[in-house]
Amino acid sequence: MRIDPASLSQKEAETAARGCMAKFSTGRWFLIRCAELALLPLVRCVDFLRLPRREAQKKPESILVIEGGQLGDIALVLPFLQNLRLHYHGSRISLLANPKVFSLLENLELVDELIPAEIPWIANSTRWGKYNPLSSQWAQFARTLFHLCRRKFDLGLCARADIRDNFLLWLTGAKQRLGYAFYGGGFLLTSTVTPDLNDLHYSSRWLRFLEHLEKGIVSRQPRLQLGPGEKSFAKEYFANLGIEEDELVIGIHPGARIRTRQWGSNNFRAVGERLAAQLPVKILWFEDPNNASGDSPGGGIVPISLPLRQFMAVLARCKLLICNDSGPMHIATALGVPVVAIFGPNKPEWFGPLGSKNRIVIHGGFWCRPCGDRCIFDQPYCLRTISTEEVFQAALDLSASALPVHCGEKHEQSDGTAA
C-alpha cells in the first residue's frame, strides 16, 4: 500500500522514516537528542554571527556533494550526479569522497572537482577507529574541513541523514544546506527534505533532492564509462584466456568488505562448478588484489585478480555476475551487467541492485535484519540458510536469455528444467 505524502506533515514523515528507514534502540535516539540539545546553542550563535549573510542564489554557482562511503555507495550516487549535471551544467560541482573511489568516476565528467577525505565515522568500522582523537585521520580531516569552510559553497548536499553528517555539512558553511532530519540534526540544515516513504532505496534518497529543488529526473539507472584503452585491454585479456567473443561468460565475485555479508567461497565455488558442468559457459572467479587467497577454485573456473579499472573492463564483458551484497554488485549494474545478488544482514529495499534484470536471493523472516553488520549470533544465519540450489537456479534463469536457442533446448532435455 502506497503512502500519500500529502497526508503527513514534515515531522510525521520524519518520525515514520525512523520506523521504516532506520533501526536503532531508544538509547541511541536518546543520545542523538542529547547531542542536539548540546549543539543547538552553538549553532544558533554561529549562524547569527556568520558574515556576510546573503540569500542563496536561484542557480548556485558552486555545489558541494558529500558522500564518504565505499564503492557501492558512490555507484548509488551516480544517478543523482548524472541528473545534477544536466540541470546545473554551468555550475561547478565538487564531490567530497574517499580517495579510494576516485578511479570509479573516470571518463564520466559528472563533477568538476574531487575532494579527497576519509570521514572517520564512515571510513572505520570500529568505535575506537571512528572516534580516536589521536588518529592522524582526524587531523587530516580537520585540515580538509578548514579548506572547505573557506570555499563558501552556494549549495551543499548530503543524503546520509545522520546528525554527524548534517553537522559536517553545517561546518562547511554552505549558504544553502539540504539534507534529511530523521536521524537528527535538522536545525543544522537550511532546508530539510521530506523522505519518500514509498521508495526507501539509498539512490532514491539522493534523487529526492532534485524533486525538492523542483528539477526533473531523467534517469534512475547508474552508468559507468570505460575508455577505449580499457576496452582493448579486456579484448586482449579474453583472447589470452582463450575465450572467444561469442562465448557466454559468467563472473563470480565471492568477496565483500564486511564479513557478515560473505556467503562463503565454497558455496560460490559449488554454484560455479554446476554452471560450468551444465552450460556451455566460461566462469571467471574475481578476487580483490588486496585480499586474494591465491588458491585456484578449480572445476574449470578461471581465477582473476585485477586493479579496479581493469576489473571493470573484464566484468563488462560478462553476461552475468554472481556476488554478495557488495560494491562489485553495484559496479556490475552500472556497467549493464545483470547480477544474482545474495543478501543477508542488509535490506534490498535500501541497498539492492538497481534495474529490472537482476535477481536477489534472500531468506525473509529474520527479525534482526538489518543489523548494521553487527551479527548478534555466532554467525550470520540469514546467509547460512541460503542453499547453493537457490543461487544456482537464479543464475540459470538469468543466463538462459544469453544462451543460444539450441543450447537452451539441449539443457531443457537433459536436466528437465527450462533454461
Image (spheres, grey):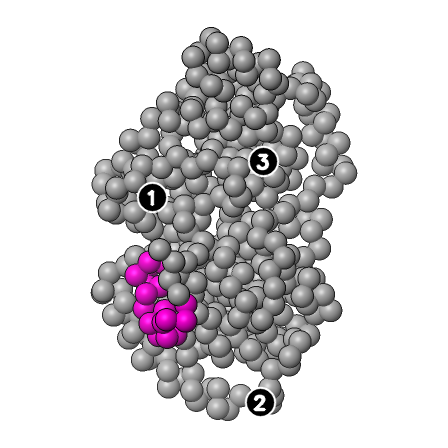
- Element under label 3? loop
Position of 263 relative to 53 (above/below): above
Residue carrying label 3: 337
Would you say the residues marked 2 and 1 are in contact, meaning their CB atoms lie under 8 Å apart?
Answer: no
Tag 2: amino acid: Arg
- Element under label 2? loop
In the image: residue 247, left or right of residue 21:
right
Q: Residues within 10 Å of mark 1 (few under 14, many from 20)?
A: many
Which residue: 27% across, 67% down? 29
Q: Which mark is residue 345?
A: 1
Which residue: 72% across, 27% down? 235
Q: Which residues are the magenta region? A: 5-22
In the image: residue 266, left or right of residue 110:
left
Which residue: 57% across, 53% down? 220
Seen from the viewer's position, the closer of residues 393 and 287 is 393
Please name the predominant secondary structure of the magenta segment in the image: helix
Seen from the viewer's position, the closer of residues 267 and 3 is 3
Tag 1: amino acid: Pro
